[in-house]
Amino acid sequence: MSLRPTTGTTPGRLPAAPPPLRVRDVTVRFAGLTALDEVSFTVAPGSVHALIGPNGAGKSTCFNVLSGLYRPSSGQVLLGDETLTGRAPHRIAALGVARTFQNIVTTEGTVADNLMVGRHVLSRAGFASTALRLPRAVREQRAHLARAREIAELTGLAARFDTPVALLSYGDRKRVELARALCLEPRVLLLDEPVAGMNGAERARTAEVIDTVRAELGLSVLLVEHDMGLVMRLADEVTVLDFGRRIAHGTPDEVRRHPEVLRAYLGTPGEDAPGEDVPGEDTPARDAGTRGTTAQGTTAQGTTAQGTTAQGTALEEATDSEGDPV
Ligand SMILES: Nc1ncnc2c1ncn2[C@@H]1O[C@H](COP(=O)(O)OP(=O)(O)OP(=O)(O)O)[C@@H](O)[C@H]1O
Ligand SMILES: [Mg+2]
């Protein structure tokens, strides 16, 4: 069964082939700080493009520009021929760019409720016809609910469809965020740390979901992640930021051996390259993200909605199969 939206039956359908997403010389300044400094990269249609870098490198700032929350001081973002810079977030979403946030934002309602919030943007029936339950509005709601169920299946949430999100495991809640973004029928999906705070099994499951989503829905994915195993496994191309500057770009293999990348992550070029391990394949999950760590493993831990996690630990610091520091 194809899970791509089908003509006629799915409201808000968008063309299947995503256009390239081009980030051109984007600069963002906050008071005295340059969070992004003339950053450029292109997310090729249907690819997984990873945006990595140590804490504070500018990754989430870049997402905020792409989704319209921040207006850059200079530079441009284009989706195909459409300029995204200067547009409101809901207009960018309507053009087919959906995102998840670094921290969990869903706290209330069932999985179905949250996915239907995602569908709301695509509703054609007005408030009055929906409230009055006019036949056209009822038909449309039914189609949206059916599509939300398909997306729940795709993201491994079908059995939890009517469960309140407050009762879900952390991993399932993170996947609800992903599913909700998919409910916008995006052509480009922006994922900001989709496995942060997850244990090894949850990471592996989410990696599978991202892989399936890209294959089944034929969309492009821009992935911000500190889990180098996940990046190396999923990404076709990688762009590396450090202090707001693009320091490297290439295939995962090229990037993890790049001297500038090793310098940014380890403080000095070392023999150990990021991303030898793939989570969920009987190897310890590793996180990367601490700026200027040393071979001795000084850490600066990141914090998620779940609390302090293994995110941001030094490259050398292995974690056990549950993602806990060893
Ligand atoms: N709204 C803001 N106002 C001022 N400074 C900001 C703002 N947002 C981000 N910054 C600063 O911009 C820099 C980049 O932050 P950003 O959140 O983009 O980093 P990041 O790469 O996502 O880091 P992390 O891996 O920790 O999530 C940091 O120095 C941060 O403190
Ligand atoms: Mg961030």
Image (cartoon, rainbow, N blue to C red):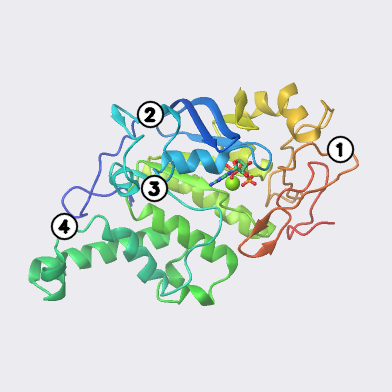
Q: Which residue: 38% across, 52% down?
A: 182
Secondary structure, mark 1, is: loop
What amino acid type should be assigned to the residue bearing mark 4?
Answer: Arg
Residue 22: x, y in percent? 41, 27
Disc 3 target residue: 98
Q: CA distance from mark 3 to mark 2?
A: 15 Å
Contact (Cβ within 8 Å) of mark 2 with mark 4: no
Q: Is any part of residue 67 visible from this angle?
A: yes
Mark 1, other Cα within 10 Å: few <14 / some 14–19 / many ≥20: some
Contact (Cβ within 8 Å) of mark 4 with mark 1: no
Secondary structure, mark 2, is: loop
Q: CA distance from mark 4 to mark 3?
A: 19 Å
Disc 2 target residue: 20
Upstream in sequence: badge 2 or badge 4: 2
Q: Which residue: 65% across, 41% down?
A: 56
Marks 4, 1: nearer the viewer: 1
